[in-house]
Image (spheres, coloured by chain):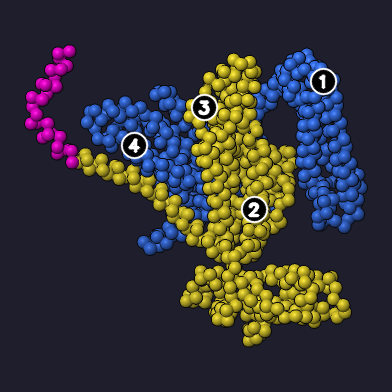
Amino acid sequence: MQTFIVVLALIGFAAIGYTMGRARAVMTAGGVPKDLHSLPSYYGSYTALWIGLPSLILLAVWMIVQPQIIDGLVMGGLPSDMTAGLSDSQFGLLLNDIRNVATGNISSRGDDPAVAAAATQLSSLRHTGFILMVVAVFGVGAGGLAFARNRISPTLRARNTVEKVINVILIISSLIAILTTVGIVLSLLFESFVFFTKVPFYEFLFGLNWSPQTALRADQVGSSGAFGAIPLFVGTLLITFIAMVVAAPIGLMSAIYMAEYADPRFRAFAKPMLEVLAGIPTVVYGFFAALTVAPFFRGAGESIGLDVSSESALAAGVVMGIMIIPFVSSLSDDVINAVPQSLRDGSYGLGATKSETIRSVVVPAALPGIVGALLLAISRAIGETMIVVMAAGLAANLTINPLEAVTTVTVQIVTLLVGDQEFDSAKTLSAFALGLVLFFITLALNVIALGVVRKYREKYD
Amino acid sequence: MTDTTSSPQGESAGPARRPLTISPHLAKRYARERLFRTLGLASVATAGLILLVLVGSIVSKGYSAFWLHHVDLTIEFSVDELNPDGGPIEMETLQKANYLGLVRDALKREFPDAASDRRERRKLYGLVSPNADIMLRNMVLNDPSLVGTTQTVSFKMSDDMDTFAKGFIDRDLPESDRRVTDAEIKWHDHFEAEGRVHVAFNIDFFTKGDSREPEEAGIYGALIGSILTLTVTLLVSFPVGVMAAVYLEEFAPKNRFTDLIEVNINNLAAVPSIVFGLLGLAVFLNFFGLPRSAPLAGGLVLALMTLPTIIIASRSALKAVPPSIREAALGLGASPLQVVTHHVLPLAMPGILTGTIIGMAQALGETAPLLMIGMVAFIVDVPQGFTDPATVLPVQVYIWADSPERAFVEKTSAAIMVLLGFLVLMNAIAVLLRKRFERRW
């Protein structure tokens, strides 16, 4: 919060700098703005940039470096018998305790005088650090202001400089998308790599047994965790398959009806309705699946003598299918509408009925787009999390019976990472390996689907 | 020419045959046509029906969460109980006094015969919400003159009793099959007969944070958490998204690199949200050391997630501005950046804002990535800033949906109704914006 105020103050400072720079420029031009190279506001922006950019960069660097220096100082100041022979994680725990004491929270080691002393040192260091930071940041800002003021003259090409800086900022913004992808790939790869040093690669990809646990003691019963992900893949595919069985026909037929048959009034009512279905958060679908659909299937199964699990793949799959219907229908709607009217007219001219035209002319012409839409929908279903977390099971059953409980990749990622995380145990790290698999499968599906759709679009444009 | 005109005449030479070959199929073909058409309509109708069932089931489960049953008890603020050591009554003694005893005494006075059995006594004490003593303490601290008087005080019923009073527990079931015992039903009927049970709007649902007691739990904490998180998301994703869109649409040269960025953005839009959660955990929490469970980290993750949506929407809004406007501005001597900031951006702004609001609505409903970065913790306090532990509305729904108490089902549904309300509001604003400012060139 304090930092937030500093940032706000810096922005205020830059705003003052803007007016000062503007006034200065007009003054150097002898009060005649048209003698300036650029508009006066550009001289203002020039000054504001000189104040804001260096100081904000300094602030960011300071925020990253300061905690590390302070931690080092505090831990170095502890009595040596306390820190000697501590492992990394114990060291971290001690540091955490000191931080807790410093912020006034209750800590297990709060009454230890050495910890208390370290905590006071920590708070005082933080305090000094903050004051130093404020002084340094505003010093740099003031330096920037002085520099910019000195540079301002009627011949200074302020607009060009400002535009160059803005251009760089624009480029950086568009690079963030790439950085995100790189960040995803690197973080997943890195943690997965650590995981694969503990569990062999082939065992993970082809093992038939999934029970992610790590032993507390070596002689514990069932100590050896099994990280064979096949049951998860099968469970994911089963639920995805059920979802597509629901979503593909309903979504496609709705799209065909909306594009070919419905009059504008019906469209005006039905399209927003499907959009509402698409806008409902997945956690709501999950709640619906777990509390309404699953008991319904269970009851229906019981009444005809079937034993349906209360976390059956069927309930999760059907609700996921419902979630995907609008996705399928809006994408297919677009491709069906893109089919040229001349093709339809040709078919009508040969005497075909409307449904014959749709089945033998429109759908084949739109097929690549429809396939693309279905692939995107599958990728959606594979990556969907909340519905399966709330309605599918946790135990990894290797089965393709839709009435039994299965678990999926996303469910396991959530269960492995919610709660305690230890980044040195195979249990936590396996979530990243699962994430990596998930990322690459959905990526492959998306690339194929977008490729198919693009190829198709080029044909008729 | 003559050949083509003569051929239809040649065919019409046998007019009697055509109906013969076509008409037997015709009825079948028309039947198929009708079937196909009906199937299409049925699909749309199915989707509509599902939406109705979904909303209906949530509303029917959740509407009752907006009120609570209270019961009036006669509380004796006896001096002996509040100040057992005697002496002058000070704030400090009042602070520490045994208010739970007051509530229990009142209940015991009401049903003296229940007080003998230990198990039954516990049930009796469980009639009212476990926070009854805190309420009494606040009453007395606000008005110390209450000490020594006897007052009728209205207490929230405990969750099971409230559920029973709302009629969700069938009293005809055998005792072992329902959450309330025969004795509890008897007590309830006693109060009911005396007209001491009454219903009040559940204001706490909108003003309190989470709680383990369903009747005390509210969505205010989660709501503030959502607002803080979305603020971070908006502050990051809107400027970055718009700037990226401006660069890609207006300034970027067409080359392999910008192609790569474009493909990248399209793919990011389809990456499962949980993967963004893994990214946030590995990068924001473990690498940069941002606080766990905080709106800051959550907002950043959601910002990365909504960025593609905003970029794509902004690009199409920018694309829709006709080139003639750019050319006219350039012709008058504006620099390319001036063209964009003075003319193109303002004209594209409604479209950009619509896309942003839709992106924000997505972010508001998102749950999975936030579970990864610890926003799923049980948090009672209302978050005060961007680095306080917090939770958000959809995650609150998830937490409550996982709770075993029957009364949390209605809380969950009610929270969903609030969440859907916000989503409808945001989408309505987006639609309105589009309708109001959309320009066809």
N-terminal of the pair, mark 2 or mark 3, is 2
Is residue B291 on the magenta stretch?
A: no
Chain B shown in which color? Answer: yellow
Residue located at (15% from left, 17% from top): B5
Tag 2 residue: B222
Tag 4 residue: A260
Residue located at (75% from left, 80% from top): B149
Q: Tell me how far mark 4 sits from mark 2, CA to CA.
A: 45 Å
| Residue A393 at least partly seen | no
Q: Chain of mark 2?
A: B
Q: Amino acid at mark 2?
A: Ala
Q: Tell me how far mark 4 sits from mark 3, CA to CA.
A: 27 Å
Q: Quadrant of the C terminus of chain A?
A: top left
Query: In the image, are marks 2 and 3 on the same chain?
Result: yes
Query: In the image, are marks 4 and 3 on the same chain?
Result: no
Q: Chain of mark 4?
A: A
